[in-house]
Amino acid sequence: MKHLRNYWLALSLLALSPGFASATPPSCATVEPERSYELGLGLQSLLPNDLPGLSNSLLMYGPSFAVPFLGQQAVLRASYGSIDALSGYLIELSYRAFLPLPFFQLFGVIGGQVLRYTNAGSADGTQGGHAGFGLSFPMGTSNHWTLGTKLLVMRKSLMSFDLLFSFVL
C-alpha cells in the first residue's frame, strides 16, 4: 500500500511541474516558401465527355516546367499518351496560386491548353481554357508531390486528374 501511495505522490508532483503540465506542443508555423524554378514529370488522366473521336479515358505523361511569376508560378506542361488506336498530346500554360498551410500547400490553377488527338486514323484537335485546384506536398527542400484536378473547357468539357513530381532547381 505504501508503494502505491508513493507512486501517486510522484505522479502528482510530475503533473504539477510546469514543463510536464503543458500538454499541447507549440503550434507549427506556416512558412511562405520562396517560389523558384521547378522541373517535373507528370501523369494525368483525361476523362472524355463525348468529345468527337475521344471516347476512352486517356492516360498521358510528360514534362512540366514552372517559373516564378507575380509571386506565384507560371507552368508550362506537355503531355503525350497512347492506348490502342487512340493517341494524343496536350500542351498547357497555367498560372498556379498557392495558399500555404502547415504540412502542405493548397493551390488553384487557371490557364489554357491545346489538345490534339488521333483515333483510328482520323485526327482532331481543340483548344480552350481550364481551371482547377490541388494539393502540393513538400518532400524536403528540393522536391515535392502534387495532386490536382482540372476542368478543361473546349467544345465539350473534360476532367483531368494529375499527379506530378517536381524538383526545385
Image (spheres, rainbow, N blue to C red):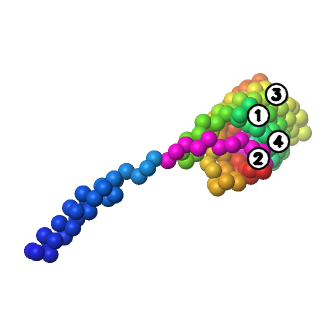
Q: Name the quadrant of the N terminus.
A: bottom left
Mark 2 and mark 3: Cα distance apart in space: 25 Å
* Residue on which disc 1 sits: 69
Please name the residue shown 10% across and 75% down the image.
Answer: 2
* Residue on which disc 4 sits: 78
Q: Residue 10, relative to residue 74: is it above or below?
A: below
Q: Earlier in the sequence, mark 4 or mark 3?
A: 4
Query: Which-is-in-front pick, marks 3 and 1?
Result: 1
What segment is highlighted magenta in the picture?
28-47
Q: Residues within 10 Å of mark 4 (few under 14, many from 20)?
A: some
Please name the residue shown 75% across and 44% down the image.
Answer: 36
Residue 112 appears at what percent x and percent y? 78, 29
Residue 8 appears at what percent x and percent y? 17, 66
Q: Residues within 10 Å of mark 2 (few under 14, many from 20)?
A: many
Membership of 29 in magenta stretch: yes
| Residue 53 seen | no
Q: Amino acid at mark 1?
A: Phe
Query: Which-is-in-front pick, marks 1 and 2?
Result: 1
Q: Earlier in the sequence, mark 3 or mark 1?
A: 1
Per the image, label 1 sits on a secondary structure element best described as strand
User: Looking at the rendering, which quadrant does residue 154 occupy?
Assistant: top right
Mark 2 and mark 4: Cα distance apart in space: 14 Å
Query: Which-is-in-front pick, marks 4 and 3?
Result: 4
User: Looking at the rendering, which quadrant does residue 105 occupy?
Assistant: top right
Per the image, label 4 sits on a secondary structure element best described as strand
